[in-house]
Amino acid sequence: MQQRLRFLDVALAGLLAGAVVSACAKKDEGGKPSPVPAMNPGAASGPSTLAAPGVPAAPPAPAAAAPGGAGTAGEGARPADHPADHPADPGATITGRIVLPPAQAKTKPKGTLFLVARRPSDNPAVRGTLIAVKKLPATSFPLPFTLGAADMPFQNGPFDGEMTLSVRIDQDGDPMSRQKGDLYGLLPKVRVGSRDVVLSLDQVQAEAESLGQPAGPMAPGGKLPAGHP
């Protein structure tokens, strides 16, 4: 009987010890702090974007403006002081009359009259840049004319400054060719705005030539031949 009671005491002590261990384990688990989540490596760099309560967030920094306010110059950008920035003045003109001297009038010239304005060239062997051209009837003289921006075949700058004026009665009507016997006249320098300009058909083409050639025939001394406006 005593042995049986001793066995029950040992079993009861074991149950009590197990309950104590289980309770301690649960207490330890409940008291542990929650694990800290892993930090984003990129969050450590740079200022925080969170604003303090009640303080408005700072506005984003404005984009830097390009110098001159015209944007970055790139492929196809128009350079400064382009001819398109200086359109031709419709009021800028040269006016005058074309005359035919009596000696040339006796030949009764026939053909198409071309009036041409070019930029003067520093090289006498090279024609200046074509600025304006006008086609007129060669029927009666003196023939009044007005040459200006409206006669520019393309925009290559304003119609201003000094011009070389030439006039020709072209027998074949082709402005790219010169026929022997064509009558022509030339004024080396005429300033835009000039009035009462007299342009005389007082010269005769000495030989035929074509302006389509890379380089026309040269006269002695490297100058263009007679009759080359």
Image (spheres, rainbow, N blue to C red):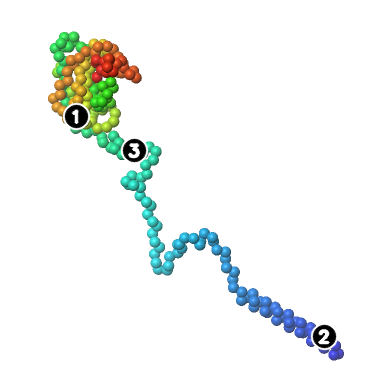
Helix, strand or loop under label 2: helix
Q: Earlier in the sequence, mark 3 or mark 2?
A: 2
**Residue at image location 59% in from the left, 71% down from the top:** 34
Alpha-carbon neighbours of circle 2 within 10 Å: few (<14), some, or many (≥20)?
Answer: few
**Residue at image location 28% in from the left, 34% down from the top:** 83
Helix, strand or loop under label 1: loop
Instruction: Tell me the residue that label 1 is attached to.
Output: 192
Alpha-carbon neighbours of circle 3 within 10 Å: few (<14), some, or many (≥20)?
Answer: few
Instruction: Tell me the residue that label 2 is attached to.
Output: 7
Total numbered circles: 3
Instruction: Tell me the residue that label 3 is attached to.
Output: 78
Foreground: 42 or 138? 42
Q: Earlier in the sequence, mark 2 or mark 1?
A: 2
Q: CA distance from mark 3 to mark 1?
A: 27 Å
The percent position of residue 198, horizontal first and vertical second, equals: 15, 21
Foreground: 140 or 208? 208
On screen, residue 58 versus residue 227, left or right, reads: right
On screen, residue 55 versus residue 138, left or right, reads: right
Alpha-carbon neighbours of circle 1 within 10 Å: few (<14), some, or many (≥20)?
Answer: some
Find residue 213 and report its image quarter.
Answer: top left
**Residue at image location 73% in from the left, 83% down from the top:** 16
Tell me the mark number nearer the camera, choosing from 3 and 2: 3
Helix, strand or loop under label 3: loop
Residue 116 visible to an observer of this rendering: yes
- Farthest residue in the top direction? 107
In the picture, the quarter occupied by the N terminus is: bottom right
- Farthest residue in the bottom direction? 2
